[in-house]
Image (tube, rainbow, N blue to C red):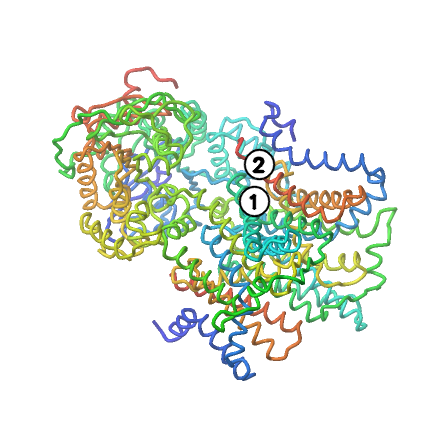
Amino acid sequence: MTDFAVSLTDIVKEFPGVRALDSASLAVKPGEVHGLVGENGAGKSTVIKVLAGVYQPEAGSITINGQHLNPATPAAVHEAGIRFIHQELHLVPHFTVTESVFMGQELLGGLGIAKREMRKRAEAFLQDNLGFVISGNRLIRDLGPAERKLVQVARALIDGAARVVVFDEPTAPLASEEVDLVMGAIAKLKLQGIAILYVSHYLSEITDICDRVTVFRQGQTVGVFDNITDDSAADLIYAMVGREIADMFPNRTSRPTQKGLSVTNLASGTVFSDVAFEADKGEILGIAGLIGSGREKLIDCLYGLRKKTAGTVALDGEPINASTAAKAVAQGIVLVPRDRRHDGLVLPMSVSENATLATLSRTSKMGLVNAKAAATETEAQIEALDIRPPNPDAITRLLSGGNQQKVVLARWLATDAKIFIFDEPTVGVDVGAKAEIYQLIADLAAKGAVVIVSSSDPVELQGICDRIIVMMRGVIVDELEATATTVDELVAATTGAASIKGTAHAS
Amino acid sequence: MQAEVSQGPKVSDLVGYLPLVIFIAVLGYISLNAPNFLTLQSLELIVIQSLPVVLVCAGLAIVVMAGGDDVVSGGIDLSIPATAVLSAGITAQMLTSGVPLAVCAMVALVACTLVGVLNAVLVTRIGMTPLLTTLAVFVAVVGVNNVITVSRRINVDHDWIVALRAEEIAGVPLGILLVALIVATLFFAAHRTRWGLNMQAAGGSRDAAEISGINVNRFVAQSFVVAAITGFLCGFFLLARGSGSSPGVQDNLMLEMVLATFLGAAFSPRRVVTLWGAVLGALLVAAISIGLKSMGVNVFWTGLIKGSLIVVVVAFSALAQRGR
Amino acid sequence: MDRSNTLRDILLRFGFLIVFAAFFILFAVWNPVFLQGGNLLNIVEGSAILLILALGLTLIVATGGIDLSIGIALDFGAAFAVVAMSTYDLNWFSAACAGVIGGSLVGIFNAILVVGLRISPFLATLSTFFIGSSVQRIFTNGGGPISYRRMPTEFRNIAQGDILGIPTEAVLAAVLVVIYYLLLERSIWGRRIHAMGMQRSAAVVAGIRVNRILIGCFIFAAMTCAVGGLIAAANIRMFTPLSGFSYLLDAIAAVFIGAALHPRGRPNVLGTVAGVLFLGMVANGLNLMGLNFNTKDALQGIILVSALALAVAQRTARSD
C-alpha cells in the first residue's frame, strides 16, 4: 500500500435515496497521471469531494503516503499535500497574475507584503514548473481560459507542498490549441514526481496523457486499466457504459415526413461557426457534444439568448428572426433550459404561476388574471403530466427535479409551439420521471412538432433520437442515424476517440 | 502600465480611458476660460475644499472592495457622511462645554465605531442588504446628531481645528498633509498587506475567496468599521472647513461621495473601485465644481453637470466592459 | 422543539405585528388623543403623499430595481401643474394632466438610462436625481418656490376638499392603492413583473419582454409620483422645488418593510400600505408625545432601523 501517494478503499457514500458511492476504490502512484472516467452520475465528483474532506463517507478508508487519514477534514487533506484544481475558474477578474497566485497565502516582507518577491516567485513558478511564460502584472480578465487555468494550478502548488494534484475537467472550456498548454504543464508536474488524478470526459485526452485509468459506473469501480494506449478508448467506453440499458425509452413508430426547421451557416462569434442542419416535423434530432463543444451556445443562439453573427434559421421555408427569447416564443420556438432552477422556473413562484407564465393572456379578462381558470388549466396539466404533489399552489422550489421539469414542460405544452428544444432534459431527474419525460418528448414528435434534444448523456441521445449531430470545439463533426449507431460509437464520436484512431494525432 | 502589454493598446483600452479623457478635456476647457483656474492658489483651494469628500470616498472604497461593486447587493456604505457629521457634532458640542479636544475625539471615535459595528451586524448577521442598511442607519445617525447639536450651527475656533485649515508645514497646508498621510495609510493597508489583498479578494469573487480559505463576512464587517473610522476623521475636517458644525452637510456629502467613488472606478485601469480612483474622483469633482464657479457658470447648473457626468462615464465604462 | 426556540419562533414570526401593536398601545396610553377618529384620519391623510410615492417605488422594486428619483417625479408633477396654471392659464384638469405628463418625463429618462444605456438602476436614478434637482434650481433661479395664489378651487380641492367627508387626497391614494393592487397582484403584467424581479433569467426564457416591462414600470411609477406632486402643490398653493427628496427614505423603508411582511418576501402593495401606516403612526404618535422636533426625528430614525432589521430577520427566519 505504501507505494501509493493516495488511495481510497471501499468508499461508501449515501445520500437520501441514493447510494452515490458503493464500495468504490481509487489509488494513485507518485509520478503518474491517473485518469478517472465515468458517465454523468457515476460518482466521480462524489469521490473527489470525499477525498477533499467535504463529504464524510459512511465506510471505507483514505490513506495518504501510507498515513491513514481519519477523519479526512479539508484542512487535514490540505496539510497532507493534496491539491484540487476545480473545474470552475474561481479567480478574481481584476486581480493580477501575481495576486491571484498568492491569494490567501501572501508573502510578507519587511513592510507589508513582499510584492516584488511574490511577482518573481509567481513568474518563476509558472515558467519552471508549468512551462508558461507570463508577466505577473497581467490582469486575469485579459487572459484566455487556458492561461487562467494555469494560474489556478500555480495557486494550488506555489507553496511547494503538493504531492497529489486532482484536476477536475481542466480542459472543458478550452479550445483545442489551448489544451496543449495545460497538457504540457501536467507533463512537467509528473516529471517532478507529483501524483496526478485527472478527471475528464475527453477520452482522447485520457488516452493521451494518462498512465493508468480507473473507471466508475454507478458508484462502483468497474475497472482499473494499466498500459493505456490510444487503442484503450474502446475498452474504457465499454466499461463506462455497461450493458444494462433497460427499455426506458418509448417505442416510436412515427417517422419524419415534412420539412420543418432548417439552419444554414449559423455562427456566433468564435464560439461556433458554419453550423448547418435540418430537423423535420415529427423528428427528434439529437445534439451531442462535450462541455465547451459549442453545443450549449448553439441552443442559446437558436433561442435568441445569444447573438448570432451569421447564418439563417428558417421554419417551413420562412426565415425566422429569433433575436430575443420573446421573439422565439412568439414564432413558435420554445426551450426547456438545462439549468431549470435558474432559467427554467421562477423558483419562489407556485406551480400554477410558473405553468401559466407564457399563456396568461389566454385566460385573463382585461389584463386581470382569472385565477380560477388558470388553476383549472393547471390542474388539468398536473393530471396529464402527473406532477407531484398535485397542488397548483405548491412552490416550485420544493419540487423534485423531475416534477420541476414537468412544470417547465407544462408551460410550453400550453402554447402552440412548433419547435421544442430540450437542453439536458433529464439532468437531476430520477429514473422513473426520466422515462415519463422521454414519453412526453416522443408524444410531442408524434404530434408533428420539431423536437431537438441536446444532451451530454449518450445513452439518452441514442435512445430517444432519430438522428444525432455531433459538435466538437465549435463545429459539427459528425451526423449519425441513431438506429445505426451504438452508444459506444456515439461516445467515441463525441469524445474525439474516433478521430484519434484514424489519424496520427499531434503530441 | 501600458508598457506591460506586449501587443500594444487595444481599442477597448482606449475606450476605457475615455472617461478620464472627457474629464480632463472639461478641466482643460475650464482653464482656458477661467485664467485663474490653473494657479497654485486655486489648485490648493480645490484640494482643501475636497478633503472631507476625499476621506469619506476612501472609506467607501474600502467597503466596496470588501463587498463587491454591485451597488444594490454588494458593498456600499451610505452612512459614512452621517458618521462624519456625528463626529463633528459630538466634538463641537463637547468643545463648547469646555471639554478638552482629546476627550471629545475619544467619545466621537467610540460613537462612530459603534455606527460601523451596527452596520456590520445588520449586514453580516441579520442579512440586510448594505444599501438598505446604511441608508436607514444614515437617517438614524443624522437624527441622533440633530438631538446632540439641537440642529443648530456650532462655531468651533479651537486652535487645532483651525490649524487643520490654516497651518502650513514647509508651504503645504497641514490638512492636506494629514489627509495624504491617512490616505497613504489606507492605501498601504488595502494594497500592500495580506489583510488588504484578502479583503479585495472577498469583494472580487466571493467563491474564489472562500475556496482560498478567506472568511468573506469577516472582511465585510471589518470594512464597515474602517469606513466608520474614516467618517470619524472626516468630522474634524468638516469642522475645519466650515469653522464649526452646521446641520445638513451630510446630504450633499453623501451624493458627492457616491459620485466621486463610482466615477473613480471608471478612471481606474482595472475598472473597479479603488482607493486612488476614489481619491482622484473626489479631487476631479471638486475641481470641476470650483472650476465652473470660477468660470462664472451658475451654481444651479453643477448638479446637472455632475449627473450627466455619471451617465456619460458609467455608460462609457459599460461600453468598454462590453468591448472586451 | 424546546421552549426558548418556540419563543424565538413566535417573536420572529409575528415580531413586526407585535411591534406595531406595542407602539399603537404605547401611543394610545400616552395620549388618548391618539385614538380619536379625527387623529387616526390625520394619520391617513398625512400619509397620502408618502403612500403614493411608496406605491410607485413598490413597482420598481418589484422589477428587481430601485428608484432614487421618485422625489424628482413628485417635484416635476407639482412644477408642471403650477406653471400650467400660472403661466399658461390652463384649467385645473389640463394642469393636472400636464403635471402627470411632466412627471412621466422623469420615468422616460430613467428608462433610457436603465434600458437603453444599461446603467444600473441605482446609479441611473441617482444621476436622474442630480440632473432633476439641478433643472429645478435653474428653472426657479436657485430654488425659490413658485406660488400661485389664484389657484382654481377645483385644483386646491385635490388636497383640501373632501369626497363624502373623506379628504380627497386620501381618496386619491386609496384609488391608486386599488389600481396598484390590481396591477401588481392580480394582473398578467403584475405576474410578469414579479417573475422578472425574482428571477430575471427565467422570465427571459419564458418569453417575457423584460425591457418593455421595465420601461413601462419606470414611466408608470413616475406618473404616480407626479400625482403626489399635484397634492403637494394643491396643499400649499405653490411649487416648492426639491421637496420630493424628503419622502425618499421613508418610501424605501415602507416598501422593504412591506416586502419583509409578505410570506414569500415579495414587494407588495398591501405590505407597502402597512409600512406607510406604521411610519405615519410612529410620526404622529411621537408628535403627540410632545417631544421636541429633534428628539422625535432621532427616535423615528432609530425605530426605522429597528423595524427594518426586525422585518428582514423575520423573513429570513421564515424562509428556513
Quadrant in the picture for the N terminus of chain A:
top left
From the top left corner, tell me how far across and down residue C249 is, in percent. 58, 60
Where does label 1 land, which residue?
Answer: C109
Q: Which quadrant of the structure image shows residue C232?
A: bottom right
Q: Is residue B296 above or below residue C227?
A: above
Which label sits in the foreground, 1 or 2? 1
Chain of the residue where label 2 is placed in the rendered structure: A
Is C112 situated left or right of A359 in this image? Answer: right
Chain of the residue where label 1 is placed in the rendered structure: C
Is A463 situated left or right of B92 in this image? Answer: left
Give the secondary structure at mark 1: helix
Is A14 situated left or right of A81 in this image? Answer: left
What is the C-alpha distance between the residues marked 1 and 2? 38 Å
**Residue appearing at x 22%, y 55% in the figure:** A390
Q: Which quadrant of the structure image shows residue B192?
A: top right
Q: Is residue A113 visible?
A: no
Amino acid at the residue labelled 1: Phe
Q: Is residue A248 above or below residue A57?
A: above
Q: Is residue A360 visible?
A: yes
What number is the disc on residue C195?
Answer: none
What number is the disc on residue A96?
Answer: 2
From the top left corner, tell me how far across and down residue A229 is, in percent. 29, 23
Q: Is residue A93 above or below residue C266?
A: above
